Image (tube, rainbow, N blue to C red):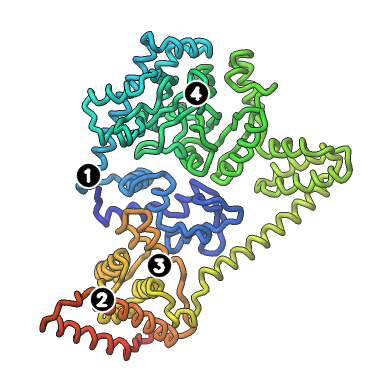
Amino acid sequence: MLYPQEILEEVRVQNDIVDVISEYLPLKQKGTSYFGLCPFHNEKTPSFSVNSERQFYYCFGCGAAGNVYTFIMQMENDTFPEAVKRLADRANIILPEPQYTQQAKEQEQQKQRLFLLHKQAGRFFYDKLQESVGEEARNYLQKRQMHLNIQKKFGIGYAPKGKNELYQYLQKQGFSQEELQKSGLFVEKKEANEYFDRFRHRLMFPILDIQGRVIGFGGRILSSGEPKYLNSPETILFNKSKNLYGLNFAKNTRKREIILVEGYMDMISLYQAGFKNVAACLGTAFNQEHAKTLKKYADSVILLYDSDNAGTMAAQRAIPILVQHGFQVKVLQVPDGKDPDEFIKQHGAETFSRLLVNAVHYIMFQIQCLKKEYDLTQTQQKVEFTIKAANILAKLDNDIERTVYTAEVSRMTDISPQVIESEISKIIIKEDMAFMQDAQQQKKMQYSKNKNEITKAAGILSAQKDILYLCASNLQVYQKIKTILSAEDFSEPIYQKVYQKIEELYQKNGTIFPAELVNYFELPEEQKKVTEIFAVVLQYHSLKAMEKALTEEVRTVKRASLNQHLAQLPLQEQSEQTDEQIKKWVAEKRNVDNLYITIADG
């Protein structure tokens, strides 16, 4: 799918990268850059930098980089055209009809076939639940008090015991063997050259995407055996680390608060009881990808996990991820170790709603969990508890919240709030100093290419990146370099394209804006590589130092290119034309050895 570059640039310009990224995670300004915790890898010290002047981001920790399109593609798992559409809608820009490439058409057709296949599979499971073979599954649902209208709404079904009943059914519906393989619903036994149904004798839960399309299944075993729950494997439609069960229904409530539970039955039980803004993880711990997905539809989350040790630990792991992505977080643990489904059946929806209202702030939950580890009648344990509690409170940015919870810790320990606040201040100062030292160290690592290192031209790829940076930063440099280097002299196809686009953009605009240059690349990995060219600012103490560095790097690239040309000549090929070409390359190489680049001052 293709859009004109003028449209891409208009959409990009109307979506300031700082504003867009701030909608996903908190940023703190430091000069012309903004820093935050990277959403693409776990970290405690912010290394994710957003440059407001250049309109791109770069993570000094994991190397994630790109412009506003790249960010949306990575955060939302969008394709490039989907990211363009999302940002155009955000800026109220009407897009023209896109042009599809042949490859894009084929990929879209493949996805549509798999959507249809999963829909048919869901119908198969639902029908089997109504038949005599589904009696055991129906009895289980009756025991769990799941209403018939809820069973229908969620498409609950039954996978029969037969080894390939679904396989045969879908074959009759006209799906090819390749499509059946890619669905993930079957297991291949290569030695027998057969395919078996992945789900057998299980209660089936269709997993829907946010648009309500079936993308996979979860199956609960009805007899003894492991695993108790089985999910579809990863496919081009389904990723359990990004999808949340029931989110397609929860978003329709228009509430910006989500109740997050652990499993299918808890989610359905709450929904049946009238709590529609509920979603569940799909048999995996809550992670960064889940948070990105959830951020589109909620600002606050109530964690409703089991009250046992496993549930408490799961909540503790989810809290920092949610906080990092800017959610307001509360935690509710059902009394007496019951799960939500059991509690609602025993006490009713009204009593449960009162529990929800009294869900505790995540800081209070963390402090309460910490308190269980200490005997506060013992002086030393009281000191240790208070220090650890102060470390938790130091993470709060809101002064009012910090004051309130400091008072709570004071009440627990009989230590004055002023003393606790003093400890918190020390921790904050220490963490700020550590952050600044770490940021400086990271910058040193990234900007370590001083004049001496540059003149050594350490590596062909490094030299190519530096040349492209200088060409895009200085028209005079580009005008000089284009008489020496052609696009083919760059070993990386992506660098060849960047070099060509630099020429186009100079002709079009008379200047190069890095974020616009990134627009010409659709794949996130390509956009990352282009952004990396501009992520490190090359600095020289004088024009002469730049000329010297540039000369060495151009020599490195040109020599490598000529050597590659010579190496590709077949040894047995001998002709007058070949001899002339070799003489030409040898002469060029000699010229390169004697090359010195000068750039007019100013």
Q: Position of residue 56 (x, y in %)?
A: 43, 59
Tell me if 33 is positioned left or right of 513 in this view: right
Q: Which residue has dot 1 on it? A: 97
> Gap in Å between the C-alphas at discs 4 and 3?
48 Å
Q: Position of residue 459 (x, y in %)?
A: 41, 75
Q: Residue at x 21, y 27 (%)?
A: 174
Mark earlier in primary sequence (4, 3): 4
Mark earlier in primary sequence (2, 3): 3
**Disc on res. 276:** 4
Mark earlier in primary sequence (4, 2): 4
User: Closer to us: mark 2 or mark 3?
Assistant: 2
Q: Which residue has dot 3 on it? A: 533
The secondary element bearing badge 4 is classed as loop
In the rendered structure, which amino acid carries the disc numbered 2? Ala
Is the C-beta separation of discs 3 and 1 under 8 Å?
no
> Gap in Å between the C-alphas at discs 1 and 2?
47 Å
> Gap in Å between the C-alphas at discs 4 and 2?
67 Å
Q: Residue at x 64, y 39 (%)?
A: 316
Mark earlier in primary sequence (1, 4): 1
